[in-house]
Image: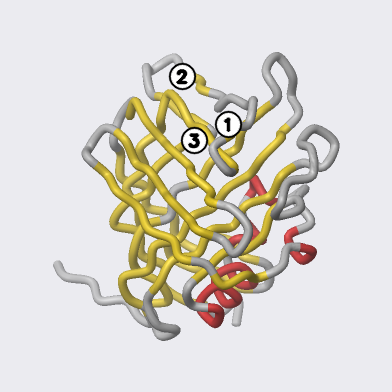
Amino acid sequence: MNEIKRPVFFSGENPGMTLYLPGTEQAIAVVSYWYCTDSPFGVGHVLVLWLNPATTPVAEIGHGGIFTDNRNLAQVLVNNLTQHFPEFQDVPINTLSTVEAQCDHTFDSHRYQVKCQTPQIPIEIEWHKLLERKQVIWPRFPAGEAAYDLTTVICPCQMGQIQLNGKRIAGEARVTQAADGQFSSTAFLAFAETWIGPLEALGE
């Protein structure tokens, strides 16, 4: 039986990455990359990048930013979704500046590469060595006072890396394997992603 859901908030791709200082529990960089193919706020690219000031020297871009070719789309995605992602819970995302930038990506089924030219430096982010592909259906994903129905195809990756002006950040993704053999990783791709909402709160 067919099921129709509205309103569509976002359609596209949304890979993410958290890199850790090797041998520690300390996150040194967090990434969320949005490639929007359709939304009420237009299409475009949004790269949200945070660099831990405790472990990463101050770069030409400070300690990160929100780099985009569609400022309105970027603000909506960050305010409504990104800031509520678990990996961003300890990130002062409201301190990141929104910056006009040209971002694009390529994918050859093995390696996903984002290139973003900021006014200061080029940023390159790579995900590679896909471990598996799985569909995730998450009804009522919690996003502050709102909720969204999320469907996406998640591909955990063995490796992830970030380069700033050609220099690689010395961090690593964390990969785990459950008893049933399924993988999870702090570097993952997300394809065919759709967010439906915002939905009414339960009980309303």
Left or right of 170? Residue 102 is left
State which quarter of the image contains the N terminus. Answer: bottom left
Query: Viewer-proximal residue, 189 or 115?
Result: 115
Q: Position of residue 31 (x, y in %)?
A: 57, 48
Image location (x, y in percent) of residue 18: 60, 37
Q: Nearer the viewer, residue 92 or 122?
A: 122
Residue assigned mark 2? 178
Q: Quick one: label 2 or label 3, which is nearer the N terminus?
A: 2
Q: Is residue 41 visible?
A: yes
Q: Nearer the viewer, mark 3 or mark 1?
A: 1
Kind of residue at disc 1: Arg
| Residue 10, image x, y percentages | 40, 72
Query: Could you say whether the residue bearing mark 2 is in a helix, strand or loop?
Result: loop
Q: Nearer the viewer, mark 2 or mark 3?
A: 3
Q: Position of residue 38 (x, y in %)?
A: 32, 76
The label shown at residue 187 is 3
Q: Which mark is residue 168?
A: 1
Figure check: 76 above or below 182: below
C-alpha gap between disc 3 and disc 1: 16 Å
Q: Is residue 202 visible?
A: no
Residue 14, quarter of picture: bottom left
Seen at 35% across and 37% down, the residue is: 155
Task: Name the N-terminal-most of marks 3 and 1.
Answer: 1
- Identified at 48% across, 42% down, the residue is 125
- Chain-order first, disc 2 or disc 1: 1
Give the residue type at disc 3.
Ala
